[in-house]
Image (cartoon, rainbow, N blue to C red):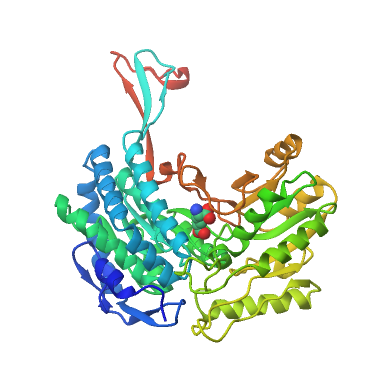
């Protein structure tokens, strides 16, 4: 039995029993086969979404290209005004959309609402930015010349998003792309198609209120094949992809082959270093939320805790005890800490990872397992586990999208930083210390090699104002705050001569 009646939520978001998975705005279609979205919360079928075919895609890209020609001519602050209106609708529908995220994806209601809050925040951020798409001015080496740079809209942006943040990551991209003058085509995860339908339905309200053309916001549901139409299409200027390293490598190569631009936000293998000077009152909630929040399915989830030998036993006992208090169950019930994994395949991956930990010699401290019985009928609920491991184990090197936490012991800070950096991924990292030297060392060029490095804060739950992304096999892209907007625009350098001569740069003389 569900804690929340989902029917009125679906109604408020204009989700029907069968939805067109393909849309250019007001117009929706989708002649491919249907995907049924099952809730990992209770295993029930929520609704269906039709997928896009090659013909549907062709229509979408044609409409998007045409919309771009119009949209790019709207002054950026007016594009910002459209994004502002979208943010207002998200504020109004925060509860409904947050609940759908929680029910379709399985994260806690608090986190579902938090995800919609990230959308609202990035809309606000984008509105401000729409008046700040600044380029620099330079002094020319030639007399009576002026030099400056400006940023122009790029074109069509393809957004490939993952199930774990089914709405926020799209919005980080699309809000910045829209104020930049770009139009977007979104290929959401097949595991959370209804979230994409809801976001698009809400955007249609803005389209209608402002009489905007079709094609500014497009949606193509389907499997990897529909993603390939997008990545291989030379009419798509930028592909922003969030997901696994495996997917990222395929996307990166396809886009590079046509010399397109890509922004990749791939796997993490995030570690927290607990030094001898850590305040465990700060560290423990950071570790537990980082490891079990979203059932360990964030790209920023804490996977490894690297603990100074002097604090190891103490922290180990605290964590074992903390895990005993975790309540696993329906994520819409606010008393629960841990919801389900996304589907049974994820459960299998979790089980095989735990087996691998043991076969490689790991010591299980808090054992995992799949839950059954009342409230766990979907078969997607698992127990968060803790294991003592070596960093070099193959399974520890790998990102398992599940609540499995690895403990590793260290003696010197240098060794801890080496362990932290000793994985192929480079997304998020943290150090827990009250010692200034340790903190600064960790943040220095000798320290963490990740895109995100925190002090006395966990690895997950970044704010939208900073650039979000990571190094190495995490893909190198940056989304969301800071100057991440630049990737959605093209830079042009302009030199203007207002003299009556034509002096050449570098003092070159060319006379005839
Ligand atoms: C992701 O898991 O892909 O920092 C994004 C965080 C969130 C975003 C995670 N703000 O955990």
Question: Residue at left 39%, top 60%?
Answer: 167
The C terminus sits in image quarter: top left
* Residue 364 placement: quadrant: bottom right
Whole-percent x, y for residue 475 in the image: 55, 55
Q: Nearer the viewer, residue 470 or 10?
A: 10
Q: Is residue 475 left or right of residue 490?
A: right
Q: Is residue 274 above or below residue 57?
A: above
Whole-percent x, y for residue 284 in the image: 68, 55
The reply to whether residue 415 is visible in this rendering is yes
Question: Residue at left 23%, top 61%?
Answer: 62
The N terminus sits in image quarter: bottom left
Q: Count of labels shown? A: 0
Whole-percent x, y for residue 313 in the image: 82, 59
Q: Is residue 161 left or right of residue 94?
A: right
Q: Is residue 297 above or below residue 3?
A: above
Question: Residue at left 38%, top 23%?
Answer: 147
Q: Is residue 57 above or below residue 182?
A: below
The reply to whether residue 53 is visible in this rendering is no
């Amino acid at each position: 039995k569900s804690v929340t009646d989902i029917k009125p939520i679906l109604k408020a978001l204009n989700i029907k029993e069968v939805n067109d998975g393909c849309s250019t705005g007001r117009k929706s279609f989708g002649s491919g086969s249907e995907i049924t979205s099952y809730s990992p919360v209770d295993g029930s079928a929520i609704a269906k979404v039709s997928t896009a075919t090659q013909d549907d895609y062709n229509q979408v890209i044609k409409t998007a290209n045409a919309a771009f020609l119009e949209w790019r001519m709207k002054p950026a602050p007016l594009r910002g005004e459209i994004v502002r209106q979208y943010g207002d609708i998200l504020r109004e529908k925060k509860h409904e959309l947050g609940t759908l995220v929680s029910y379709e994806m399985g994260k806690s209601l608090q986190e579902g609402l938090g995800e919609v809050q990230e959308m609202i925040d990035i809309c606000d951020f984008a509105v401000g930015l729409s008046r700040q798409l600044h380029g620099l001015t330079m002094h020319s080496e030639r007399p009576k010349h002026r030099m400056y740079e400006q940023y122009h809209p790029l074109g069509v942006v393809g957004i490939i998003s993952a199930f774990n943040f089914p709405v926020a990551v799209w919005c980080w991209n699309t809000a910045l792309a829209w104020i930049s003058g770009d139009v977007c085509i979104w290929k959401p995860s097949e595991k959370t198609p209804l979230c994409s339908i809801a976001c698009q339905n809400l955007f249609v309200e803005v389209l209608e209120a402002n009489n905007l053309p079709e094609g500014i916001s497009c949606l193509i549901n389907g499997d990897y094949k529909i993603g390939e139409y997008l990545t291989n299409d030379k009419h798509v200027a930028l592909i922003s992809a969030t997901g696994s390293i495996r997917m990222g490598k395929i996307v990166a190569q396809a886009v590079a082959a046509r010399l397109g631009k890509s922004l990749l936000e791939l796997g993490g293998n995030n570690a927290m270093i607990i030094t001898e000077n850590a305040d465990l009152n700060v560290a423990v909630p950071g570790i537990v939320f980082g490891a079990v929040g979203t059932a360990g399915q964030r790209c920023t989830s804490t996977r490894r805790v690297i603990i100074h030998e002097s604090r190891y036993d103490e922290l180990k006992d605290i964590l074992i005890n903390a895990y005993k208090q975790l309540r696993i169950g329906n994520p819409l019930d606010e008393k629960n800490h841990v919801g389900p994994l996304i589907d049974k395949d994820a459960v299998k991956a979790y089980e095989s990872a735990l087996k691998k930990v043991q076969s490689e010699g790991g010591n299980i401290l808090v054992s995992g397992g799949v839950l059954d019985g009342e409230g766990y009928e979907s078969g997607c609920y698992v127990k968060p586990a803790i294991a003592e491991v070596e960093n070099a184990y193959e399974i520890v090197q790998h990102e398992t999208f599940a609540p499995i936490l690895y403990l590793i012991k260290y003696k010197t800070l240098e060794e801890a930083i080496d362990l932290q950096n000793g994985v192929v991924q480079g997304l998020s990292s943290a150090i827990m210390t009250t010692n200034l030297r340790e903190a600064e060392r960790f943040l220095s060029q000798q320290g963490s090699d990740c895109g995100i490095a925190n002090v006395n804060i966990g690895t997950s739950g970044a704010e939208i104002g900073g650039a979000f992304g990571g190094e190495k096999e995490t893909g190198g892209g940056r989304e969301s705050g800071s100057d991440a907007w630049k990737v959605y625009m093209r830079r042009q350098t302009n030199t203007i001569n207002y003299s009556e001569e034509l002096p050449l740069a570098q003092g070159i003389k060319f006379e005839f």
